[in-house]
Each structure stands twice: as C-alpha cells, then as structure tokens.
Amino acid sequence: MSKDEDGSADRRKRLNMPAITWIIGNSRRPGTLGAATSVSGKFLRRRARATRDNEDWILSTDNGVRTISTGEFFTHIANGDFLPATVEVLPDIAPNLFDRAVRDAEGALTCLYTARAKFTEVAAAGEGGVPIFEYAMASHELDMTLQMSVVSVILSIATVEAQLNKWAVVLGGWAENEDRLSVGEKVKTLAARFSVSIDLGRAPYQRLSEAVSRRNEYVHSSPIPRPMSLTGRNVTVPGTSIAMEAREACLGTRQALIALAKTLGQPLPRYLSACPNSDPPTEESWSGAVVLDGVREDPDFPKRNL
C-alpha cells in the first residue's frame, strides 16, 4: 500500500486493535493516565473530531456535527474511514497510586519477614561467628522495608489528593484558592458543601491526618533527631514501626475516602478494596493483600465474580 499525501496509510498500519479498543472503551489503557475523551484526526479525508458523550460520540467535521453510536465509531476507525491522529486523555491516576501504595506496604512487610528470619540465623550462630552473607541480606531487606514504606505513605496521600480533585470537578470545581488548601482542609471544604462538619482528629479521619503528617516529614525531610528505643519493651527489629506506618496510611486513606464518598453522595471508589479492612498491627491480614483483593470478605465492597 503506497503512502498518500495525508500519510493515511501509515497511520492505519500503526493503529492496532488494542489501541482502537482503548479509544472506544471508557477505561484507562495500561501505561496511560486515563481514558480517551476525544479523538482528532480525519474522517473521509476531512479534519474531524469525535468527543465522548456518555455512551455515544459527537462527530464534528467540516460538514457539521452529528451524534454516532460507539458501534458506528468503532466501525469507522476499524475500516479506515476515521483515521485518529491525537487523543485527549482524562487523567484518573488515583487507582494506580493506591494500588502501588498497597503493594509497597505489603512488600515492606514481606521484606521485614525476610530480615527477621535472617537475623534469627545470625543470632543462632552464636560464638561461631557472624554469618556475613546472612547479615548483609538482612540489612538489605531492612533497607527495602524502609524504602517501600516511605513510598507507600507518600502514594497513599497522593491518592487522596487525586480523588479529592476528581470529586471537586464532579461537584462544580474548586473555588478560588481552594485547590491550594491542604489535604485535610480540602476534605473539610468538600464536606461543608453538604453542611457536614468534619473533625480530622477523630475516626474515620484520624489515621489520614496522621499519615499526612508523616508524608510531610518524608517529602519535606529535615535533619531533626527522632528517638529510637534500644532496650526495654518497645524494642523492635528496625523497620517494624515504619512498615506499620505504611499500613496505617493505606487504611487511613481507605477509611477517609469511603466516609467522604458517603457524605458527598458519590460511589465508593472500588480501588480502595485493595487495602484490607483490618488493623495494621494484624500482619497476617496483609500477607497476600493484593492477590486477595476482590475475593476476601469486605464490608464495603462485594466480592468480584470470578
């Protein structure tokens, strides 16, 4: 097939079926920020733009504007009548952020388990000498625990910010300077639109407030000493407390967003089911947190049909 003056033949070759399916479907394509909301290109060799309108598409060309069904639009793209050139994507990153936050919280716990086991081997060596390899591996796992936990806390709060901004758009947008408010103030601002007063120091928002403070410590880190017990009842394997903070941040995000969704009359974000609905100290519930999403008992989200 020779290339015509518009390069249509080349574009047709590059647009594969997964790309067409993504454009038509109202969901995020892997590797992108969100779903396609409009497509620009050429329709029967004329400049055209198709904009999603619920279940249909509004097709605008030099000849006018008309509404076509999703099936019609799919046919036009598939047979080469409509040749897409650019796509506008509506960012919806909160689900991905939270998925990563939960995975890292679970991963931090897994690394902590491995480190504990390695340190047990080191302690068992006794006077026989410190097993260098086991000690090095344990130290590496503890650093991985630290890194994953910090990332989990940061991404948990980023999830909340993304979801708050999405709800704000649905509810008419932020007023002047409201988008500059802190996470907690944005929560209170949205709830106030429904005449609901929120106390960030009490459940179900207390965990979120604590996680925001911890996020701020990491993102705006300062060389300020923090106490750490070396003896007594509070002594734990390094990494234990920060791994707990990651799970607290995930649960705090889940609890706060579910409560606020109910206040705002919005559907519960399904992606929150990735976080187990159990206290963070219960480590067992976090083993397999991600893989059990949708199949474990959950008071807020029904099991998915397998």
Image (cartoon, helix red, strand yellow):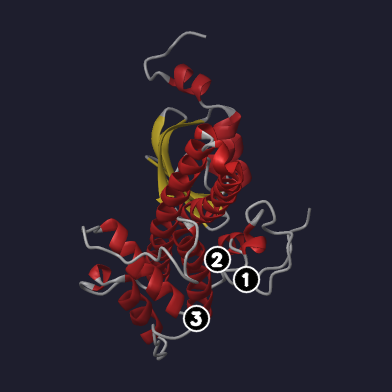
Q: Residue at x 22, y 62 (%)?
A: 224
Would residue 34 be visible to someone looking at this image? no
Q: Does 194 sit above or below residue 222?
A: below
Label 2 vs 1, first from the N-terminus: 2
Q: Does 165 sit above or below residue 191?
A: above
Q: Residue furthest top?
A: 2
Residue highlighted by disc 1: 278
Residues 70 and 32: in front is 32
The CA span between labels 2 and 1 is 18 Å
Amino acid, disc 2: Pro
Amino acid, disc 1: Ser
The CA span between labels 2 and 3 is 16 Å
Amino acid, disc 3: Pro
Q: Residue at x 47, y 50 (%)?
A: 145
Q: Position of residue 261 (x, y in %)?
A: 51, 75
Q: Callout 2: few (<14), some (14-19), or many (20+) C-alpha neighbours within 10 Å?
A: some
Res. 78 image quadrant: top right
Q: Callout 1: few (<14), some (14-19), or many (20+) C-alpha neighbours within 10 Å?
A: some
Q: Position of residue 177 (x, y in %)?
A: 20, 72
Q: Does 198 sit above or below residue 9?
A: below
Q: Secondary structure at mark 1?
A: loop
Residue highlighted by disc 2: 269
Residues 273 and 172: in front is 273
Q: Position of residue 63 (x, y in %)?
A: 40, 41
Q: Residue at x 67, y 68 (%)?
A: 301
Residue 204, disc = 3
| Proximity of marks 2 and 3: CB atoms separated by less than 8 Å | no
Q: Secondary structure at mark 3?
A: loop
Residues 89 and 128: in front is 128
Q: Secondary structure at mark 2?
A: loop
The CA span between labels 1 and 3 is 13 Å
Mark 1 or 3: the one toward you: 1
